[in-house]
Amino acid sequence: MVKDKKGFGLFFKQGLREVEVRQRLSRFGPNMIDHHKEVGELTLLWSQFRSPLIYILIFAAFITSLLGDFVDTGVISLAVGVNTILGFYQERKAQRALAALRAILTPKAIVIREGRRQTVEAPDIVPGDICFVGLGDRIPADGVVAEEDDFTVTEAILTGESVPVLKRRTRLKDFDGEDVEDLQERWKGLVREERVFAGTIVSSGTATILVVVTGNKTEVGKIARSLEETVQEPTPLQKRIDRFSNQLAVFVGITAFVIFATGLLVGESFLSIFTTSVAIAVAAIPEGMAVSLTAILAIGMQRILRRKALVRKLMAAETLGSVTVICVDKTGTLTEGVMRVTKAEFVDEEVGIQAAVLANDQRDPLEIAIWDWVRERKNVDPSHIAEASERVDAIPFSPTEKFTAKLYDGRVFVMGAPEVVLSFCSMPGSTKHRWMRKFEQYGLKGLRIVGFAVRPRKDGERKLTKKSVRSGLTWVGIVVHEDPIRAGVSEAFAEAKKAGITVKVITGDHRATAEAVLEQLGLLTQKDKLRARFPLVMEGSELETLSLDELRGRVRDIVLFSRIDPVQKLSIVEALQANGEVVAMTGDGVNDAPALKRADVGIVVSGATDVAKETADMVLLDNNFSTIAAAVEEGRGIFENLRKVILYLLSDSFSEVTLVMGSLLLRIPLPLTAAQILWINLISDGFPNLALTVEPREGDLMRQRPRDPREPLVNSEIKLLILLISAVTGVVTLIAFYWFWRTSGDVYSARTVAFSMLGANSLIYVFSARSLRSPIWQTKFFSNPWLLLAVLGGFLFQLTALYIPFFQSLLMTRPLTPFEWLWVFLEALIVIVIIECTKWIFSKRRLTTPLTERIT
C-alpha cells in the first residue's frame, strides 16, 4: 500500500513505527473512555442528608434527646439511618454502571509494529494500527476488516442481539491517502458488515483489523458520554416527599410556636408548656413515615419479585404505579424471541428435508429452528442425514448475496432469501409469480421465510463459485418461521388500556413485521388506521428529520416506531416526558443505557448486558410484557399503602395537636402529658402503622387512570380526611375531658379518659383506613392478619398502661369505669361513620369530576 504521512500510513506487513504511534497517541489520545472523577463515598454519604424530611427528623431527634426521651431519639435515628444507607447504596450502583462500561475497553491486543507482532495494552492502540483477533477475543477499537476467515462477531453488548454478525473485508485502498478525521467520517458510511466495534466479541474465525476510531470516539465511547450526560430526574415519589416535607416542616414549626406562645399567655409554666409543645411538635412529625416508606417499598419489591420482576431501586417500585406510557421492544418481550417453524411448503418433501438439513450450518436461530423442526415434527434425526453425506465445498452465507450453497457428493443445495433463491431457478413465469405472491403474503403477516433449491453436482466439480449456483437450480420450496407472541400479552395490553396506560412499541424490525404482530395483539388494527386523524406508525428515517418540538407533537399519536436505533429511543423518551408523561422504557444493549437512564423506569430483560442492567430500575426475569403490567399494578398498590400510612399517622398526630390547642384556648388543664402522647404514638399505634405497610393491594387498581405526576402525596381527599378525623377526635376528646374533669374534679382521671379515647380510637379506625375508596364492610377482614395482631397488641399495651401499677405511676393513669369505656368506643364509632361517609362522597365525586380538577 502507498504510505502517506497525513493518512494512516499503512505498510500492511510492517505496521506503524513507534514514532508514529507516539505522535498519534498525542494527537488522538489513549484508547480509553474518559470520565469525570467519581464522587467519593463520604461525599455520597453526606449527600443523603440533603432532604427536608431528614432535616425534620434530625431536629426531632435532637430535641427528644435534650428532653431525655432516648427511646424516641433511637426510633427517629433508626429511620434516618435506614434511608441514608439505602440512598447511598443506590447512588453507588449508578456509578458502577459507568465503571462497567469503561471496563469494556480494557483488554490487551496483538498488533504489528515495525514489522513484528507484539502484545500491547488497549489504551496504547492508535488509528492505523493493524490488530489480529481470533475466537473469543474482544475487539479493542472500532475499525474495518482487512482480512478475514469465516469471521463472525457477537455484538450483543451493543445491540442486545445474540445472533453473530458475519463480517466481510473492505477495500483498504479507500483508507489511505487522506487525513485521519476524513477517513473516520468515511468509515461511518460503510455497511455494518464491514465495520467492527470496540467491546464486541469474536464468535468464530479470525481477522486482521485496521483500527480507525479509538477512545471516546468509538461507539462504546459515545454511549458512555451520552450515559454520563443524561440527566436522571427525581422520581415522582421523591418530588412528592420533598414537597410534603417542606409543607410539614412549616406547619409543625408554626404549630409548636403557637402552642408555646399561647401556653405562656394563659399562665402555663415555662417548663410544662415547653415540654408539651415539643412533644406535640415531635408527635406531628411522622417519624414512623421514613421507616414505613422503606418498609412499603421493600415489601412492594418482594411482591413484584414474586410476579417475575426484580426491582433494583427502591423508589422505582412506586414509580411503576405512576407510569402513563410503556415503551416496549417487540422481540423477546411481546414475542418469545425464539424462531419456530410453523409450516413448510415443498415440491418434493423428501428432497426438501434433505435440503433443510444439508444446506444448514446451525449458525443462527433460523437454521437451528429448521434443524429442530426436522427432528421434532418429521421424526427424522437430522444428524443421520448429515453424517451420511460428505460435504465437498461451501459458500458461506453473505448478508449482501443473501444465500449460502453447499456442495456434496451428488448434489448442490442452496438456501437463502426466497426471492433470491427463486431467481436462480428455472420455472414458468406464472409459477414463479405464484410463489412470489406467497412470499409477500407471509411477509405481511410478519413471518420469516427461507427458500431452498437443488441441482446435480457437475462432473469433476470440486469448488463452488457464486456464478455456478446462480442458474440451473430446481426449486424445492420454503420453510416458514415465526416468533410466537407470548402467552398473556394480549390480556396484559387490554389490562394496560383499562388502567389508562398507553403502550408504544419501539423496534428495530421492519415496519411490516412489527405491524403484523401488533395487529394480532389488537394494538394496531386496520380500523385503527382508518379512523386515525394522524399516522400511527413512524419509521426511524422520518424521526431523524424531526426536531424535539415536532416530535412532541407527533409522539402522542404514534403506536409503532419501526427501524429505530437506540439514540432515537432517547429522543422518544425525552419527547414523551416533555409532554408530561411518566415513561417506562425497555432495552437490553449497552446502547440502550442512555434511554434506560433517562426514562422514569428503565426496564431490561434478564439476558441484557451488564451495563444496561446497572442502569435499569427493573429486570424482567421472564422477559414478558405481562410482567410489566403486573409490576405497574404492584406499584400502584405501593402508593396506596403509603397514603394509608400517612393518613393514619397524621390523623393521629393532628388529633393530639387539636386537643392541646383547644385546651389552651379554653384555658383548662392540658388533657395529655408528654409521656402519654409519646406512648400513644410509639407504643399503642406503632404496630398498626407498620401493619398497614403489608396491606394487600386492592382489586380495582388497574381499572383506575394513572396518577397525574403533579398530584401531591397528600391530595385534597387525604387532607380533608385528616382534617375531619383530627377535628372530630380532638373536639370529642376535649368535650369528654372537660366533662369528666368538671364532674369529678380529678384532672388525672379526666386525662386517663382522654388518653384512652385517643389510643383506642386510632386502633379502631385503622380498619376504615385500609381502603381509601371501598367501604369498610367490603374489605376482607382477615386478608391482613398482621393488622389484626397489631391492633390486638395495641389494645394490650393500652390496657397495660391503665391496669399495671408501674405504668400507672409512669403515665399517671387509673382503670376506667364501664361508663368511661362507653365514651371511648362511642368516639371511635363516630369517627368511622365520618370516614365512611366521606369516602362515599369522594367515590361519587370521582365518577363526575375530570382528573385535572382533582389535583390540588
Image (cartoon, rainbow, N blue to C red):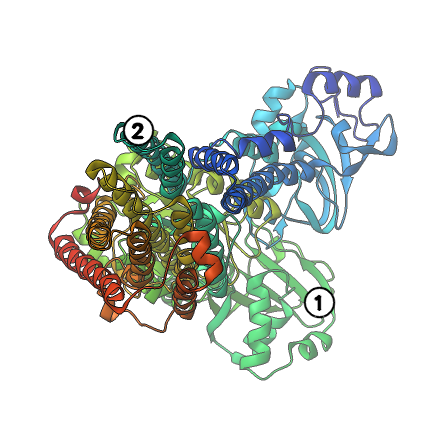
Q: Secondary structure at mark 1?
A: loop
- Foreground pick, 725 / 415: 725
Residue 264: give its label: 2
- Foreground pick, 355 / 760: 760
Q: Residue at x 41, y 33 (%)?
A: 271
Q: Secondary structure at mark 2?
A: helix
333 relative position to 380: left or right = left
Q: Residue at x 45, y 66 (%)?
A: 482
Q: Position of residue 840 (x, y in %)?
A: 15, 59
- Decide if residue 324 is in sight here: yes
Above or below — where is 699 with respect to 467? Answer: below
Specify the quadrant of the image occupied by residue 29.
Answer: top right
Question: What residue would you read off at disc 1?
Answer: 459
Q: Amino acid at mark 1?
A: Asp
Q: Position of residue 7 (x, y in %)?
A: 69, 19
Specify the quadrant of the image occupied by residue 385.
Answer: bottom right
- Foreground pick, 669 / 466: 669
- Decide if residue 155 is in sight here: no
Quadrant holding the C terminus? top left
Q: Residues within 10 Å of mark 1 (few under 14, many from 20)?
A: few
User: Given the current orientation, which residue lies at the most extreme front position?
Assistant: 745
